Image (cartoon, grey):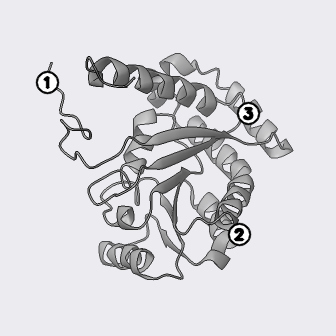
Amino acid sequence: MCRHMKRGPRGVMSQLKMPEYDLIYVEETDAIKQAIKAESLLQIDPDTIEDNIDTFGGEIATVRRLMGIALAPQVADYIHMLFEQGEEKLTVFAWHIEVLDILERELHEHGLVRIDGRTGATKKDALVQKFVNDPNTHLAIGNILSMGTGTDGLQLVCNHGLIAEPDWVPGNNIQAFDRLDRGGQGRAVQGDIFVAPNSIAAKVLGSALRKNQTIHKALDYRIGDAA
């Protein structure tokens, strides 16, 4: 087995510190209860979802949209709290236009840029530069595909990323956090993923985080290293 490690003394980017990924459990509002009920009707087994996710078609898109909209107000409240506690720059990923609309409306006072599927490459670069260089722009919000892939520069000023509505495929969430966990990052990255208790996302991602920790211990640990 040959494994190219990203960080540590043997890594290709040895300056990077080990990131921390956490699940943030929201309160069960009526809207979230309705979204969980809609999820339950799909009868999805979280343990096999990555192998079968394509078989549910538009039904998954519908329930994920309902959950994202239900989560968004609490995500906005959490971000307000982080800024009150002294955070300077935050990066927030979401899936749906409606969710980004809620976040933009609720958080505009902090100064923000928004990147989604309608943002062209030139404008995207300009928005990233504004986030990096403008001291009055504290927040970058974007679609998890449009901003979560092929975007460089966010890591120069930000080490805290939040996913307002997670992908049920765990690797796609890590790909978004990798916009911060890359060359030029001088601090340990904190990645927060918002989930509703007993939701499909909570079950899938909780298991994934445990598996990732196990994989790290098995493949990155050397005799004499700290656990």
- Tell me the kind of residue under disc 2: Glu
Residue 162: x percent and y percent?
55, 52
Q: Say if 133 sits above or below 66 in the image.
A: below
Q: Say if 6 sits above or below 82 in the image.
A: above
**Label 2 Cα neighbours within 10 Å, binned few <14 / some 14-19 / many ≥20:** some
- Quadrant, the N terminus: top left
Q: Looking at the image, which is closer to me, 32 or 90?
A: 90
Extreme residue in the front direction: 224
Going from N to C along the chain, the mark reached first, 3 or 2, is: 3
The residue at 44%/75% (across/down) is 131
Numbered disc 3: secondary structure: helix
The answer to the question of whether label 3 and label 2 lie on touching residues, with beta carbons closer than 8 A, is no
The answer to the question of whether label 3 and label 1 lie on touching residues, with beta carbons closer than 8 A, is no
Numbered disc 2: secondary structure: helix
Residue 196 picture quarter: top right
Q: Looking at the image, which is closer to me, 22 or 97?
A: 22
Residue 16: x percent and y percent?
30, 48
Numbered disc 1: secondary structure: loop
Residue on which the image places disc 1: 2
The label shown at residue 106 is 2
**Label 1 Cα neighbours within 10 Å, binned few <14 / some 14-19 / many ≥20:** few
Going from N to C along the chain, the mark reached first, 1 or 2, is: 1
Residue 101 appears left or right of 132: right
The label shown at residue 36 is 3
The residue at 22%/45% (across/down) is 14
Residue 142: x percent and y percent?
49, 62
- Tell me the kind of residue under disc 3: Ile
